[in-house]
Amino acid sequence: MNRVFICKGCKRKVIRKKWPKRKYCSLQCFHNSEKQKGNPFYGKKHTKAFREKLSNLAKRRMQDPKKNVFFKDGRYSSRRLIRQEANGICQECYNGLTGIITFLDIHHKNLNENDDRLENLIALCPNCHRITHLKKAKRI
């Protein structure tokens, strides 16, 4: 049984045999209409000066994550910043390879792994990180 419906994206009449609840004529039409839904700037024209201003604002946020509006919610960003500030040196034993920041573990001082405030995070070498957790486990 053929079914006639009007595509929500392109507003054309479409005849289909299968899928009686279908609302779009194709995946491309579906994706195009979904793009328009969530973006308030979709289809609007901006001046070159305004686009440049937005671009510069985004670049500044990337350069200084502390000024980034979304920084405090960004788990990856806060961990990366703590590692960069430590500069590859463990904050407990002060050993490490200066400039090589990837080997450092990030430890939560209050043991709440969801508390990613900068004052709660510290960069430790893997050895000190294990020792710190073992000491806290023995106290409990």
Image (cartoon, grey):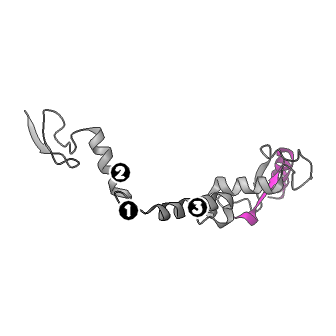
Question: Mark 2 — residue?
Answer: 35
What's the amino acid at mark 2?
Answer: Lys
Q: Main secondary structure of the magenta part?
A: helix
Please name whichever residue, 40 or 120, is drawn nearer the observer in this view of the structure. 40
- Alpha carbons under labels 1 and 3: distance apart: 20 Å
Say which quadrant the C terminus sits in. bottom right
Q: Would residue 22 appear left or right of 126 to someone viewing this image?
A: left
Is 128 magenta? The answer is: yes
**Secondary structure beneath label 1:** loop
Residue 11, how many percent across, how many down?
17, 48
Query: At x 48% / y 60%, what residue is drawn?
Result: 51
Which residue is rendered at x = 76% and y = 52% of the image? Answer: 106
State which tag comes first along the sequence, 2 or 3.
2
* Residue of label 1: 40
Quarter of the image for residue 60 reads bottom right
Q: Secondary structure at mark 2?
A: helix
Magenta residues span 116-139
Residue 116 visible at all: no
Mark in the foreground, 2 or 3: 3
Whether label 2 touches label 3, CB < 8 Å: no
Task: Quickly name the residue at label 3.
Answer: 56
Badge 1 crowding class, 10 Å Cα cut-off, few under 14, some 14 to 19, many 20 or more, is few
- Which mark is first along the chain, 3 or 1? 1
The residue sitting at 28% across, 44% down in the picture is: 30
87 sits to left or right of 95:
left
Q: Position of residue 36 (x, y in %)?
A: 33, 54
Circle 3 packing at 10 Å, graded few (<14), some (14-19), many (20+), is few
Residue 44 is situated, as x and y percent measured from the top left of the image, at: 35, 60
* Alpha carbons under labels 2 and 3: distance apart: 25 Å
